[in-house]
Structure formats: structure tokens, C-alpha cells
Image (spheres, rainbow, N blue to C red):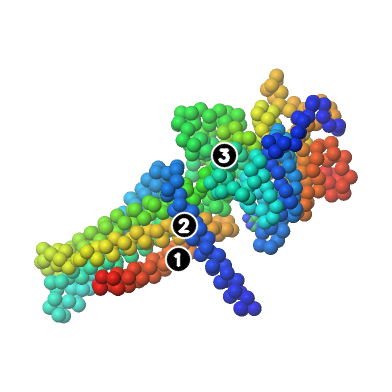
Amino acid sequence: MTTVAQPRIDHVDTAQDQIVVFDHVSIGFDGKPVLDDISFRVHRGENRIIIGPAGVGKSVLLKLTNGLLKPDAGTISLFGHNLGEMKQRDLFTLRGDVGTVFQEGALFDSLTVRDNVGFRLAEEHVPDDEIDRRVTEALRFVELEHTLYQFPSELSGGMRRRVAIARAIVTNPKLLLYDSPTGGLDPITSTTIVELIIKQRDASHTTSLLVTHRLQDAFMLATHRYSHDCKCIEPLPEGETDPNTTFLVLNDGHIVFDGNTHDLVHSDDPFIRQYLQ
Amino acid sequence: MPLATLDTAAKRWVLSVQDYALLTGRALVNLFRRPFYWSDIVLQADSIGIGSLPIVILTGFFTGGVLALNSASTLAQFGATAVTGQLVSLAMIKELGPVLTSLMVSGRNASGMASELGSMMVTEQIDAMRALGTDPLKKLVMPRIVSTVVMLFFLTIVSDAVGILGGAFVSSVMLGQNSSQYFHTAYQSLVYSDVLEGLMKPIAFGFIISTIGCYFGMSTRGGTQGVGRSTTQAVVVASIIIIATDFFITQIFITVFGR
Ligand SMILES: Nc1ncnc2c1ncn2[C@@H]1O[C@H](COP(=O)(O)OP(=O)(O)OP(=O)(O)O)[C@@H](O)[C@H]1O
Ligand SMILES: [Mg+2]
């Protein structure tokens, strides 16, 4: 595999262009360090895949990104705003531009699928018929428009995950955070979900952070694209990888790799070699 | 070693009081901020107020009745059965109406709030709400506080009224006393401060029930078991604080109004 045939989006390092910036971030719980001195940045249009062993702090990293957790040390900036210096109220406003898919979906179990997906729209006092229209559109995207009036408990695990994706993308956020969107699903359902994520990525070029346990998902994201001609997911030509897909590998609280697909597969770091095997 | 555990226990206690104060403060600040969640308040008011009405009516009626039974048998020894109405109405309005209603509502709603918010907490729904840009203190906690305070106020009035009626029923139908005399003494004996005391208490108790219920819900850790723990703790703590607060409010009224 060699990288890049298409021109890569050129990163002029302006603050405008940096969607997420972690600067020497550390966090621990009950005196036990989880993430230690983490620094990385995500540029506009970049799709960052985060991999690492279970319990390393991948979910914590995503929650830090949208300010649900506060770091013990270091600074985190989102869209150029330093989260540590923001008021609670402004944080809630800022999160309006971030779509989050939680590890377990975290759908509101006492609301119907329609009210789950339309939650943010209802909070913004969008008129009811427009909510209906946009919710149906988002559900059609994840191929679940028939579930509008069902409750989350009446759906299968894979369907719930797709509803969670619909809820995250319904407002066209500028940043998407996916926490293990395929975790705990069978391979076929996982593939469906990954295809959805690729379709979303190539249709709206949203910047994203995606946590996954499954390396095959990560490589599928790096080597496939959505084709408007056949309206399907197709592999990139042999040897090419998606230029905007980059990786962050965590181990033991530290970043052990930060770079593109090519460098990842050619890395000679013993941990990464073992992990990729 | 015991000293060290005492130390951490004290620290943890101070921390939870601080968290409780923070949660309450933030939720109250939201009273004055847009958007105002009218529909959530109405929804909660319906479940707390209308939902609790049957149990409040039943407890009120039987409490008034048992007060009349007890006081009539004691008063008969002094030939003073005529003041049964006074005893029942004073006891109902100043103490038993507010306290018993609050304890019933606490058992029903402090637990309900703790378990509902607790399950949302352990399934990350609270985090999801925050991630969607909505402050759960505004959307979930504030409406519960407002509607509990308002509804408990009216529930207490209902309970007082039904209790006095229950006393009237017992004293006139079962004990054969004169019912117009009962109502006359019941009404005559009341002064302004009694009514004020009886209406202040449910406001304080409603606040205690809702904030304690929400606090235990929002601080739930550790899965389904944690939800169960929060629920029990919420009811126990709310009940104890209600009874203790009742003592202090009564003491203050005695100091200020002399009765
Ligand atoms: N709210 C919390 N309180 C205490 N400890 C926490 C909390 N959240 C996470 N942790 C701890 O932080 C560590 C990292 O957790 P995290 O959920 O981020 O792991 P992860 O990398 O997402 O794992 P997985 O791949 O299994 O999802 C774990 O050891 C966990 O116990
Ligand atoms: Mg995780």
C-alpha cells in the first residue's frame, strides 16, 4: 500500500483550520492516571481513527474532546475555543456543532426514535413538520425510516447504533465523534455501519474522530470510498488509501503513533507491529 | 487506621454537600434563563401532583379521623369534647398535613426522580443530553424542583381540608358530636401564623424532596445496583431532612409568633 493519489487537502496551519487541538493533556481517575501528556491535532476535513487496547482511555479522550470531562492538566481547543476557559453555557452552545455517537448508543429510552433523532431540533424550537422532514431524511440515510415511532428497546443492537448515528448527523455538525460504532456487533452489521460512515464522510466531508476496536473497520475506512455513480461503497484503486484518514494509536496512556495509513502499516514500533498482526 | 477512614468519610461528606449545593444552585439559576421548559414542568406537575392525589387524600382523611378518635377519647375525660375540631384542625394544618403529605410524596417522587435520573446516568443518557447541547440541570432538574414545590403546596392544602373533613366524619358520625360545633371550633382557633406556618412548610419540603431526589439520581454510580442504592438513599435522606426541618421551622414560628 502506498499513500495518496488524489491531492491531499493542504494544511495551512491556521487556527481556523484546526478543529481539535490537544496540548499536553493528562487525566486520571481516583489517582490512577489514564491519559498522560497527550498532544495531537485534527484539521478540518481530517478523519482521525483512534485505536488502542481496551481500557486505554479512548472513550475518555472523546469525552474530553466535547468537554464532558475536564483534563487534570493541559489544554484542549475545539474550533479554536479553549474549553478550559469557557463558561458552562457557552460549552452547551459549542456542542451544538458536534455530533456524538456513544459507545452504547445512549439513546433516550423513554423517547421514540423520532424524538431521539429530533431531540436537538426540538430543543432549538424547530417547527414540528420540519423536524419530521429532517428526522425522516436522517433516518432514510441510515435506512431506518420505518422505525419512526418505535422505542429504542424495540430495536436490534445494530439498528440502535444506526439511530444514534442519525441523531448525531441530523443537524449537519462540523465535527463527528464516533465511539466504537461497531463494538459488539456481528461482522455483517459492522460492515453496514462502516459503509454508512464512509457514505457520510464522502457526502459531507465532516471532520471526525472515530474510535474502533476492529482493525478491519479502520482499514476499510482507509481504503474505500463512496461512489456517487453506483451509489455504493467501492474500494480505492489498488495501493491507494484515503488521504484524509489518519491514525492515532494509544497504549498505556501515551500516543504511540500519530500519522497516516502508509506510515502505520510500515511502522517498525514493536507494539504497533504486534497490534496489527 | 480508623482515624484515616473517619477522615475520608468526613471529606466525602463535605464533598457531597458541596455537590448538592452546586447542583441546586445551578438548577435554580436556570429558572431565570431561556429557554424555559414549560412543557416539562407541566408534565412533571401532572405526574407529581395528579399522580399523588389519591394517596394524599387517603392519608389525609384517615389521619384527620384518627386524630378525632384519639383526641375525643382524651378530651372526654375532661368533658371537653367540644374542642375536638380545634385539635384536629391545628394538628392537621400546622404539622400532620405538611409532614405526612411530604413523606408520602417523598416516598413516591424522590424515589422516582432518583431512579429515573439514576438510570439515565448509568446508561450515559445524561452525557448524551449534554453532548447534544442541552443542560440536564435545566431540562431535567429545574422542572422537577418547580413542579414539586408548586404541587406539594396544593397537595398539602388538599390534605389539610380532607383531614379536617375526616375528623368531622369521625366525630359526628361515629362519636355523635355536633358537626357545626366541630367546624366552628376548627375555624375559630386558627390564627394567621398557623396558616402561614402550614403553607411555608410544604414549600420547604417540596424543595427538599426534589433536590435530594435529583441529587441522588445525578450522582448515581455503578449500574443497576447503583440505581437501587440511590433510590433508597434519596427517600431515607429526604424523609429525615423533612422531619428535622419541620422541627426547626416550628421552633422558629414559636419564637417569632409565640405559638
Ligand atoms: N467516569 C469515570 N470514573 C472513573 N474511572 C473512569 C471513568 N471513565 C473512565 N474511567 C477509567 O478510565 C479508563 C479508560 O476508560 P475508557 O472508557 O476511556 O476506555 P476505552 O479505551 O474506551 O475502553 P474500551 O475500548 O473498552 O471502550 C478505564 O480504566 C476506566 O476505568
Ligand atoms: Mg470505550
Front residue (pair A223, A91): A91
Q: Image point 46% across, 35% down: which residue?
A: A125
Label 2 Cα neighbours within 10 Å, binned few <14 / some 14-19 / many ≥20? many
| Image location (x, y in percent) of residue A248 | 77, 43
User: Residue reaching furthest top?
Assistant: A229
Q: Amino acid at mark 3?
A: Gly
Label 3 Cα neighbours within 10 Å, binned few <14 / some 14-19 / many ≥20? many
Query: In the rendered image, which quarter contains the C terminus of chain B?
Result: bottom left
Front residue (pair A69, A41): A41
Q: Amino acid at mark 1?
A: Val
- Label 3 marks which chain's residue? A
A77 relative to A239, above or below = below
Q: Which mark is residue A96?
A: 3
Q: Which mark is residue B24?
A: 2
Q: CA distance from mark 2 to mark 3?
A: 25 Å
| Image location (x, y in percent) of residue A220 | 76, 34
Toward which corner of the image does residue A152 lie, by quadrant?
top right
Toward which corner of the image does residue B156 lie, by quadrant?
bottom left
Tag 1 and tag 2 share a subunit: yes
| Image location (x, y in percent) of residue A94 | 58, 41
Q: CA distance from mark 1 to mark 3?
A: 37 Å
Tag 2 and tag 3 share a subunit: no
Q: Amino acid at mark 2?
A: Thr
What secondary structure is marked by label 1? helix
- Label 1 marks which chain's residue? B
Q: Are marks 1 and 3 in contact (CB under 8 Å)?
A: no
Q: Image point 28% across, 71% down: which residue?
A: B256
- Label 2 marks which chain's residue? B
Q: Which mark is residue B237?
A: 1
Q: Is residue B108 left or right of residue A195?
A: left
Front residue (pair A238, A173): A173
Q: CA distance from mark 1 to mark 2?
A: 16 Å
